[in-house]
Image: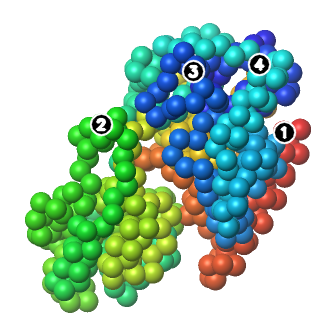
């Protein structure tokens, strides 16, 4: 039986390679080289558009590094290509982009079980097992078809930063909801006038990330970055996302001059979202400026805010835990389209979707990877009910917590638990 993979980016390449190496015939579709998205230039597969860095290689101190080790254990072609084409980059894994894409392209085209077809697929297939991994720049006809089947599809990603709960300085913060209405789950971060003025001055002068031309109108029509809002006037934020009204500080009995609210991002309460702080600042600037808020002076940023063109489905409503569509279980959504954020995360979602789809193809029992792994925790996160869903990257905050107080030791223990779980999963599926 032949299966179809739509999209030859990182996720699609992972899926096609996994199936083909197990003797399954694959039809791999991509619009290249007959056409290109606005961001792509090369005819090769798995093109890295924005950066040559695949982030940290530290598996015991960084979730991105741990995810890469999980993928190495699972036989990822992305990790294989990265190892062959890496360049010096300190503690990060960086690659020669041209050589990286060329390596994956050659491996895919040399596999006799893969037939590559340069064709634009405009509709979600009705028959056969298919993995759709067309990425954040899915073409308009297919995007509309996916929207019709999955029920929702977003065309830009405007996400606020997320911080680790245990890094919030509760001596400078307090819990409670505006005017006491709610379940009391918000954490409030007050500022006095002097603190606010210093924060404001730093915010409006901070360096912003560069957007592609094709992204600008899509992104900013839908959501205003906090730094753009601030530029409208010194007090604009105090009547917007930093509005103090209704937030009585129990330590003073008064409203503060300005107050940032943090919203619980997960049921366990290990992650908190900076409410209303969608931003296009560079990551380093986000760390510098947002840490000026007293309660966030030691904040660990699990996800920085992003604003870019990014088609992704409402995964919590649309996807089963195995990445298949609830309304059409023969269709799997992988890569960034599924709601993961980042190159390695996209590759991981493609590989995991292929593992699950392969078992379904062979009529085998469903076996899901443990959410003690970064890969499993990402899959769980994107398929768990979340009315404020936004794409997620690899971070330790999505992993089940451990009762270890020292942060460095906690991450090491999480990593050891994760790698043991991956090896157990490999034994189960084999």
User: Which of the two labelled residues, at mark 4 and mark 1, occupies the earlier sequence position?
Assistant: 4
Q: Which residue is mark 2?
A: 218
Q: How is the image coloured?
A: rainbow
Q: Which residue is mark 1?
A: 429
User: Which of the two labelled residues, at mark 2 and mark 3, occupies the earlier sequence position?
Assistant: 3
Q: Secondary structure at mark 2?
A: helix
User: Which of the two labelled residues, at mark 2 and mark 4, occupies the earlier sequence position?
Assistant: 4
User: Which of the two labelled residues, at mark 2 and mark 1, occupies the earlier sequence position?
Assistant: 2
Residue 72 position within the rendered picture, expressed as x and y whole percent measured from the top left = 79, 49
Badge 2: residue crowd in 10 Å (few <14, some 14–19, many ≥20) = some
Q: Which residue corresponds to the image point at 63% horizontal and 35% vertical from the top-left? A: 46
What is the C-alpha distance between the residues marked 2 and 4?
36 Å
Image quadrant where one finds the C terminus: top right
Q: Viewed as shown, does residue 385 lie left or right of 7?
A: left
Question: Looking at the rendered structure, which numbered label has been put on residue 32?
Answer: 3
Badge 3: residue crowd in 10 Å (few <14, some 14–19, many ≥20) = many
Residue 104 position within the rendered picture, expressed as x and y whole percent measured from the top left = 73, 34
What is the C-alpha distance between the residues marked 3 and 4?
16 Å
Q: Which residue is mark 4?
A: 114
Question: Looking at the rendered structure, which numbered label has been put on residue 12?
Answer: none
The vertical placement of 112 against 18, above or below, is above
């Amino acid at each position: 039986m032949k299966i179809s993979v739509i999209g030859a980016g990182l996720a699609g390449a992972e899926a096609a390679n996994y199936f083909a190496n197990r003797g399954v015939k694959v039809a791999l579709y991509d619009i290249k080289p007959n056409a290109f998205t606005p961001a792509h230039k090369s005819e090769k597969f798995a093109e890295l558009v924005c950066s040559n860095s695949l982030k940290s290689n530290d598996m015991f101190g960084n979730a991105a590094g741990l995810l890469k080790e999980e993928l190495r254990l699972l036989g990822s072609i992305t990790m294989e290509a990265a190892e062959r084409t890496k360049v010096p980059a300190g503690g990060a894994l960086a690659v020669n982009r041209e050589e990286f894409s060329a390596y994956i392209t050659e491996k895919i085209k040399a596999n006799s079980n893969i037939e590559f077809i340069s064709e634009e697929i405009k509709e979600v297939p009705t028959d056969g097992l298919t993995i759709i991994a067309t990425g954040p720049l899915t073409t308009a006809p297919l995007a509309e078809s996916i929207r019709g089947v999955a029920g929702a599809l977003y065309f830009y990603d405007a996400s606020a930063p997320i911080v680790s709960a245990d890094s919030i300085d509760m001596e400078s913060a307090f819990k409670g909801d505006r005017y006491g209405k709610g379940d009391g789950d918000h954490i409030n971060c007050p500022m006095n006038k002097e603190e606010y003025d210093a924060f404001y001055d730093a915010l409006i002068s901070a360096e912003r990330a560069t957007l592609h031309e094709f992204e600008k109108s899509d992104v900013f029509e839908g959501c205003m970055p906090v730094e753009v809002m601030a530029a409208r006037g010194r007090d604009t934020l105090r009547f917007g996302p930093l509005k103090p009204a209704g937030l009585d500080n129990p330590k003073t009995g008064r409203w503060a001059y300005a107050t940032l609210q943090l919203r619980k991002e997960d049921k366990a309460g290990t992650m908190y979202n900076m409410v209303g702080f969608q931003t296009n600042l560079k990551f380093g600037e986000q760390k510098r400026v947002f840490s000026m808020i007293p309660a966030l002076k030691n904040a660990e940023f699990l996800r920085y805010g992003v604003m870019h063109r990014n088609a992704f489905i409402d995964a919590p409503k649309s996807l089963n835990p195995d990445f298949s569509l609830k309304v059409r279980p023969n269709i799997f959504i992988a890569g960034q389209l599924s709601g993961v954020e980042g190159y390695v995360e996209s590759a991981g979602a493609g590989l995991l979707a292929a593992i699950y789809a392969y078992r379904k193809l062979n009529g085998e029992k469903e076996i899901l990877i443990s959410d003690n792994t970064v890969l499993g925790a990402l899959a769980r996160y994107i398929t768990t009910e979340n009315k404020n869903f936004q794409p997620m990257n690899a971070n330790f905050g999505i992993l089940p917590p451990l009762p270890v107080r020292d942060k460095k030791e906690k991450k090491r223990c999480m990593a050891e638990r994760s790698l043991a779980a991956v090896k157990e999963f490999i034994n189960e599926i084999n």
